[in-house]
Image (spheres, rainbow, N blue to C red):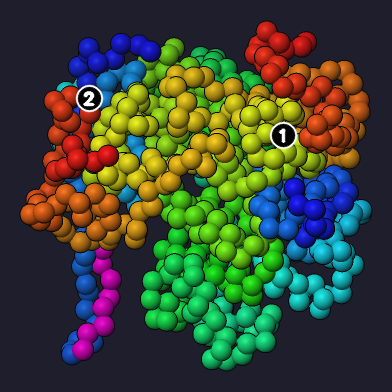
Amino acid sequence: MSESAPVLQVEDLRVHFKTDEGKVHAVNGVSFHVNEGESLAIVGESGCGKSVTNMAVLRLIPMPPGEIPTGRILYRGRDLLNMRNDEIRAVRGGRISMIFQDPMTSLNPFLRISRQLTESIELHTPLRGEAARARAIEVLAQVGIPEPAARIDSYPHEFSGGMRQRVMIAMALSTDPDLLIADEPTTALDVTIQAQILQLIRRLQRERGMSLVLITHDLAVVAGLCTRVVVMYGGTVVEVAPVDDLFADPRHPYTLALLRSVPRLDAPPGRALEPIEGLPPKLMSEPRNCPFAPRCRFVRDRCLHEAPPLEADADGRLRACFVPIRAGQAVDAAEERP
Amino acid sequence: MSKRTGQPPLLEVEDLEMHFEQRRLEVTAGWPPVRVARTTVRAVNGVSYTLHPAETLGLVGESGCGKSTTARATLQLHRPTGGSVRFQGAELTQLDGPRLRALRRDLQMIFQDPYASLDPRWTVGRIIAEPLRNFSIAAGGELRDRVEELMLTVGLDPSFVGRYPHEFSGGQRQRIGIARALALEPKVIFCDEPVSALDVSIQAQIINLLQSLQERLGIAFVFIAHDLAVVRHLSHRVAIMYLGRIVETTTRERITHETRHPYSRALLGAVPIPDPKVERSREPVLLEGTLPSPTEERRGCDFVSRCPLRPRVDNDGRCLGERPRLLPFAGDSSHLVACHYADRSE
């Protein structure tokens, strides 16, 4: 881990949404940081709060129905949550950029790519007119779009899915951000295209020393791209670990269960998958217990009455669990506690 | 695994062809100022495969390669424009409505989005009972018993019989779709991306359910998905499609490291492995370009424009001039490859 101050520090973030059925506690006291130049993964399944957390970082939570009762989001020491609207606009899409899952819904179908690219360049950099256009062509070339000078005046529908995602990445990079937040950037793409886009993100990050937050449900993508991982479940962070440690020695039962529930192309055929029985929590109230307890194989009485805090093990690994898995512990059916 | 290959195949598909005519208005230079331009989309272009009882055949390939259309044309949901589909000896392409309908009992399908394929205004009980009613198989108390039994089979609580699809989670909705497909005790179920919309922990539940159903009931599956790890996990054999054709068919054991078609290698090489050490140590073969248009007709191999192998091996233009046929590799009939230079790929 780097010695310098983190680029982004999220502290005790809570996000609630008022709905007809009651208040949804989408994010419940999430803390993590992003170091300079690192690529951090935030992993979890639908509804775990990973996207909402990052929407909050970008100040994109609609309020109402959303509210942020507690939390600080420090970008280079300044709290994004206290910024005026014009201040946040200068940061969002400029110093902090984002890419979303579906490039077709994130691009305006009525506007040429050139217009959409130059708009953000003119908003966030001193470049104007022809200079902004030249910059746009330059970033399109960097993301591997063939004949960028000719393609720049195309409309989004004239590009394939993979090419549209490249355009999104070009747009995100056009303002030379120092933090890129990518929310499931390859989920909608075919694997061969996914491999191209991941390679591209890897190269651009290396060349620019940019920090990356990758939000995904796909552990395989994390393994190839990220150096540190935050695992989320039920609106909370359940484990934080360097990528190698997380895969080799998961401490939280949810992390272990997640790793065992995915089929691997390189595993011996015939290995049975271990599904996680039950369903994720509905988050209709402030959790007073471990959110994973109802599905946990190792659950104890205490887990049902008390929410475990995110604490460090002796070796500094962070996990929110009263009965963390020990390294080398045989975790098979025989070890399960009643 | 059960013994599958000793028996005659349930389903034999040969040279299946599904071409769609596309019409659009085109502006002309002269008079009349517009004309109707017709193009043919060759979605499925000569696909052959067999399926044995209690076997799972995986069908993989990228978006637009024709895997879903292959399933639909096999089931006669689209009437194929060419080729033959024999199910237990009956030629489905020649059958008229009523006789085809009778065979549909044995051939069912489950879909990717369980929400879009379930009527939101129907209760679960009615959805699962519908096929039984349609074929007048059960009524009254017997029907209720059968629905309850089906719900138990797929792991749904029978007390939820009066609930509507929106009251269930995605995984449970997929279970409803599976119960409906099982109602007529089919011999074959086509599964079109049945777990793609589900979270991984739920995905594993459905995968295990499909496997246990096969073991208990001996159902054969054609399993379509873009996730190769999932397909390999479930399938006994895997067919890899590219641009409306099968380019390679091989066994589950060989799929990871012993494929011979350069497209198969690129596709499998692009699949990330959930292990950081493995990921760091390998260099994916990146395919250049995208899928060519399915409206073009080619004489040679469909993969020439992107093939990483061809520049090294094709000295006499054979790849461009002659379409490779799907043939046994090294005399092994369980491993079919459509590449002139399959023995040169590495």
Q: Which residue is mark 2?
A: B334
Q: Is residue A61 above or below residue B326?
A: below
Crowdedness of circle 1 by 10 Å Cα count: few (<14), some, many (20+)? some
For the residues labelled 1 and 2, the Cα–Cα distance comes to 42 Å
Tell me residue B100's x, y (percent).
Answer: 25, 32
Q: In terms of image quadrants, where is residue B11?
A: top left
Residue occupying image coordinates x 47% and y 36%:
B194
Chain bearing mark 2: B
Tell me residue B243's x, y (percent).
Answer: 27, 50
Q: Secondary structure at mark 2?
A: strand
**Can residue B242 be spotted in the picture?**
yes
Residue occupying image coordinates x 49% and y 55%:
A199
Chain bearing mark 1: A
Are the residues tagged 1 and 2 within 8 Å (C-beta)? no
* Front-lying residue, B272 or B237: B272
Q: Is residue B92 left or right of residue A148?
A: left
Amino acid type at image mark 2: Ser
Tell me residue B133's x, y (percent).
Answer: 44, 26
> Quick one: quadrant of the C terminus of chain A?
top right
Crowdedness of circle 2 by 10 Å Cα count: few (<14), some, many (20+)? few
Q: Which residue is mark 1?
A: A280
Which contiguous range is marked in magenta? B17-29
Amino acid type at image mark 1: Pro
Name the magenta segment's main secondary structure: strand
* Front-lying residue, A122 or B158: A122
Q: Is residue A218 left or right of residue A178?
A: left
Tell me residue B214's x, y (percent).
Answer: 42, 18
Residue occupying image coordinates x 87% and y 40%:
A285
Q: Secondary structure at mark 1?
A: loop
| Badge 1 and badge 2 in a common chain | no
* 1 vs 2, front mark: 2
Q: Is residue B343 above or below residue B252?
A: below
